[in-house]
């Protein structure tokens, strides 16, 4: 009887993945090279949830562009979208963050003028300057600036000032998230908390044991990797993987997108054995 019960316990693999530099090529933002493999994973029932600093608008565009219907986590864990696609009882949208106006008010009250003078709000720049920073074509950039929960900034000071700024932000109940190209002032959210919340919700609705695979390439992914069952790091030449202290870390020797497929194959192999 016990054996029978154990046999019934199937595993549901859920992949939480960063996009830029992890799944998508750093420069072209494409993943054509491994697209067949990616679709194969979905077709065998693996759930893939992009967990990105990108906005809801950008992630919806990603779904549309590739004709996908994935649930996703936007703006560094600020909001979770489309869990109803995984189970009908789950919500379509969850907010884990205050609005960007509320975040701005905290910033405005707490940051002293001498540090404020070192900060450029990217959304206040001219369109062509924004494009240079985001490194995106105009139509993609218009999706990137539709931010509901984060304030992208450029910090123009020295390291000591930057650390002082980050400390005040953290003491005020906010966070600074450093992703691929920009820094964002966010609420006290991160990719890891949103992943854990998502797992908790899915767990309530499905009987199978959830096995999480976390994939990232940068500092703002590390906490998510630490909290996933199978942490995967995709090679990123501008991020030193020696700084990552995770026991069972799976690392790729190639950058995205090839590196993404490599780490996932290794993780799935480990899960099977
Ligand atoms: Mg990345």
Image: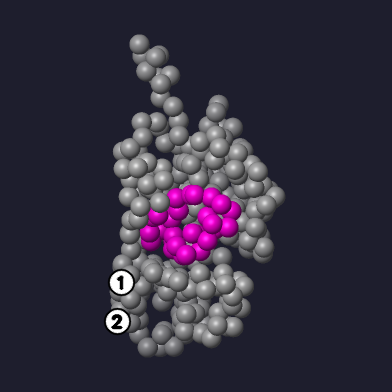
Q: Quadrant of residue 9?
A: top left
Taking the image as drawn, is residue 18 in sight? Answer: no
Q: Which residue is mark 1?
A: 172
Q: Determine whether the residue tagged by mark 2 lies in a helix, strand or loop.
A: helix
Report how many numbered discs are placed on residues in the image: 2
Q: Is residue 59 magenta?
A: yes
Q: Is residue 266 shown left or right of residue 59?
A: right
State the mark number for residue 109: 2
Q: Residues within 10 Å of mark 1 (few under 14, many from 20)?
A: some
Q: Residue sitting at 52 percent across and 55 percent down?
A: 63
Do labels 2 and 1 touch, CB within 8 Å? yes
Q: Earlier in the sequence, mark 2 or mark 1?
A: 2
52 is higher (above) or lower (below) than 113: above
The residue at the far top in this view is 1
> Which residues make up the magenta segment?
55-81
Percent position of residue 30, x then y: 65, 58
Q: Is residue 16 shown left or right of residue 134?
A: left
Q: Is residue 131 magenta?
A: no
């Amino acid at each position: 009887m016990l054996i029978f019960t154990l046999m019934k316990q199937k595993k549901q693999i859920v992949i939480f993945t960063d996009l830029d530099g992890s799944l998508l090529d750093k420069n072209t933002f494409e993943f054509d090279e491994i697209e067949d493999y990616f679709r194969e994973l979905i077709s065998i029932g693996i759930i893939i949830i992009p967990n990105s600093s990108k906005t809801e608008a950008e992630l919806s565009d990603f779904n549309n562009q590739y004709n996908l219907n994935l649930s996703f986590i936007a703006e560094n864990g600020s909001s979770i979208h489309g869990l109803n696609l995984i189970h009908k009882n789950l919500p379509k949208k969850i907010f884990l963050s205050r609005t960007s106006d509320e975040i701005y008010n905290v910033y405005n009250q707490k940051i002293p003028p001498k540090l404020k003078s070192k900060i450029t709000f990217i959304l206040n720049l001219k369109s062509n300057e924004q494009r240079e920073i985001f490194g995106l074509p105009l139509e993609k950039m218009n999706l990137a600036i539709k931010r509901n929960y984060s304030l992208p900034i450029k910090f123009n000071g020295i390291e000591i000032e930057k650390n002082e700024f980050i400390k005040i932000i953290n003491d005020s109940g906010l966070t600074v998230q450093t992703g691929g190209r920009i820094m964002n002032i966010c609420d006290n959210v991160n990719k890891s908390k949103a992943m854990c919340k998502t797992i908790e919700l899915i767990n309530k609705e499905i009987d199978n044991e959830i096995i999480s695979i976390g994939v990232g390439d940068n500092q703002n992914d590390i906490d998510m990797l630490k909290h996933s069952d199978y942490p995967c790091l995709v090679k990123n030449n501008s991020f030193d993987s020696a700084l990552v202290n995770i026991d069972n870390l799976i690392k790729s020797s190639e950058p995205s997108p090839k590196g993404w497929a490599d780490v996932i194959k290794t993780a799935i192999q480990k899960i099977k054995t």
